[in-house]
Amino acid sequence: MSVPPTSPSHRATSRVARRTLLGAAGAVAAGAVITPTVMATTDDSEPAATSQDDAGSGTTTETFPRTRAEAASGEAPVEAAFPIGYIGVAWGGTDETTGGGIRLRGADGDQDAWKPLGDGGCSVANGGGVLIAADQAAGYELKAPDGATGLRSLALDTRHGPHRKVQVPTDPTRVRGVEYLSRAAWGADEKLRFKADGTENSPTAFYPFQTITVHHTAMANDDPDPAATVRAIYQLHAVTNDWGDIGYHFLIDEEGRIYEGRYSGDDGMPAHDKDGKVVTGFHVGGFNSGNLGIALLGTFTEQGPKEPAREALTRLVRALVRLHGVDPQARVTYTNPVNGVQKEVSEISGHRDWMATECPGAVMYQELDRLRTSVAAARR
């Protein structure tokens, strides 16, 4: 049921306007949680916002598919009017996926076997839903996890919808020399950050940097269209989970492309404000502010990331620890600035160091020592 990826999702060239390179900043402060309460709008009719702080940077108009979504509730079979690329599944009553399942139905009416919902990844651990690749299915059927209430789902197409035009800067953008794809360059629809009344669902809040947390997205490896997957994660986090934005500060695909995540304004570099403080994301419930989240696309429970992704993660983390002047091999005391709760963690940690979750996968978690060593060696 697969189809070739569409060209807008495979922009290998990084494009953004925010190219401010901040000097080293101290790392002292804290982390908080933003809890949005209202669903964001999904109107894609206008171009996505983009920043243009570089006076010499030009822009070019590119097209991206508008995300199409159909919501459903309960376990009854669901059909969609478009090829389903991803299915978001959310529920209440438990943060476990045990007993839950899904089976897909092709356009010819054939049904796949039941498959488990998986471990759910970061989103479920943080109180959100799970995102499942659907391989262009025509429909699906669900089994709710044991003890779940209020089962709901969302069929998503982030690859074949009507085109919308986006102004994308022509020059590559870098974080202290590390190239990345801006939100505009991977097709983020900035309207998803806003409520129906036009107010921002989760207004940006900034705190001094403290730590870096590594995640995996717990989705399929060998992804043929990672930018489409990033757009689907964005939809799940911003709208289905009602967080108002994508939860991570950066994402990295298997080929080593780095994607800008959480919106941080138009006057600083990604994930930061002009003073070098970190925008609060939604990746470690209860410990978010001052905690910078990087997610590797894929599942790394039984295998590690491909070498390009591993190298990109090392480059990005190296740039960030240099920016903030911290020791990548240190143990630190993270302090939540809202309630003063503290936690002893490594300067570069995995999601499971903060809460009960498989993230970032058993194999990737074992690689964190290698990451810390590689980053530290480059600093000498």
Image (spheres, grey):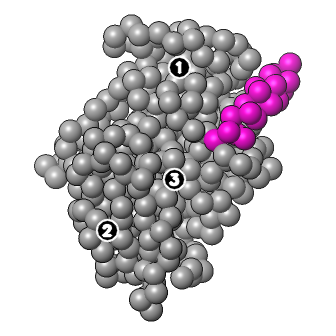
Label 2: element kind: strand
Which badge, 1 or 3, is on the more N-terminal residue?
Answer: 3
Give coordinates of residue 223: x percent, y percent: 62, 64
Q: Is residue 143 visible?
A: yes
In front of the other: label 1 or label 3? 3
Residue 367: within the magenta? yes
> Which type of secondary structure does the marked residue at label 1 adopt?
loop
Q: Residue at x 51, y 53 (%)?
A: 118
Indicate the quadrant where residue 206 lies: top left
Which residue has dot 1 on it? 209
Residue 162 sits above or below residue 343 on the image: below
Q: Quadrant of the N terminus?
A: bottom right
The answer to whether residue 304 is above or below residue 136 is above
Q: What whole-number distance in Å separates the C-alpha atoms at marks 1 and 3?
A: 32 Å
**319 magenta-colored:** no
Counting residues from the start of the chain, the first of labels 3 and 2 encountered is 2
Picture coordinates of residue 179, whole percent (x, y): 67, 46
Q: Which residues are magenta?
A: 361-380
Question: Which residue does the numbered mark 3 point to in the structure image?
Answer: 118
Q: Which element carries disc 3, helix, strand or loop?
A: loop
How busy is the neighbourhood of tag 3: few (under 14 within 10 Å), some, or many (20 plus)? Answer: some
Q: Which residue is mark 2?
A: 69
Q: Is residue 355 above or below residue 166?
A: above
Cα distance between the residues tagged 1 and 2: 36 Å
Give the spatial CA distance, label 3 vs label 2: 22 Å
Circle 3: residue type: Gly
Query: The residue under label 1 is which amino acid type?
Result: Phe
Is residue 318 found left or right of 17 in the rendered image?
right
Mark closest to the chain's N terminus, 1 or 2:
2
